[in-house]
Structures are given as C-alpha cells and as structure tokens.
Amino acid sequence: MSNHEIARSLSLAEGAVKAYVSAILLKLGLNNRVQAAILAYEAGLVDDGCGGASPGRLR
C-alpha cells in the first residue's frame, strides 16, 4: 500500500504515515519496504501469496 492509501484508510495525514514507516524501518535496521516484507515473510507473518489456506497467511 502507498502512504496515501494507508493514510486514507486510517484517517491520518500522509506525512504522519511516512514518519511512522520511517521510524519502523529505522528501528528494524532496514532501508526500505521490500526489506520489511522479506523480514515479515521470514518471520512467518505472511505467506508467499500463492493461495491456499496456509496457517502463516496474514495472521
């Protein structure tokens, strides 16, 4: 999701979302959302998106 989409769905300012995302990436020692997605996948928080009802799918 884009910062705009997140802001709209949570009724936040887009700048606030950008600040929150940046703070999360900093705390996790990551450079971008791709690295965050990989970390989430490796931690079992999401699956590979290939379908099925796997237990790891967006818990």
Image (tube, helix red, strand yellow):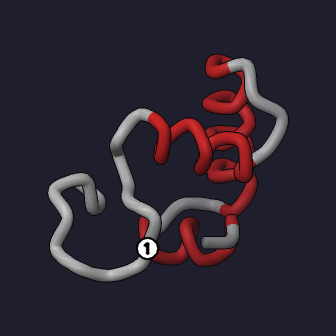
Q: Amino acid at mark 1?
A: Gly
Q: Relative to 53, is 35 on the left or the right?
A: right
Q: Relative to 4, is 48 on the left or the right?
A: left
- The residue wearing badge 1 is 49
Q: What residue appears at the point 63 percent right and 42 percent down from the top-left corner?
A: 36
Q: What residue appears at the point 43 percent right and 73 percent down from the top-left corner?
A: 49
Seen in the picture, residue 4 relative to 3 is either above or below; the reply is: below
Query: As rendered, which of 54 and 31 lies closer to the eye?
Result: 54
Q: Quadrant of residue 51?
A: bottom left
Query: As rendered, which of 25 and 7 lies closer to the eye?
Result: 25
Q: What residue appears at the point 64 percent right and 17 percent down from the top-left corner?
A: 27
Q: Relative to 28, is 19 on the left or the right?
A: right
Element class at badge 1: loop
Q: What residue appears at the point 57 percent right and 67 percent down from the top-left corner?
A: 7
Q: Residue 21: where, in percent of width, then height?
A: 66, 43
Quadrant of image for the N terminus: bottom right
Seen in the picture, residue 22 relative to 59 is either above or below; the reply is: above
Number of residues whose C-alpha sits closer than 10 Å to that of mark 1, classed few (under 14), some (14–19) or many (20 or more): few
Q: Quadrant of residue 46?
A: bottom left
Q: Relative to 37, is 14 on the left or the right?
A: right
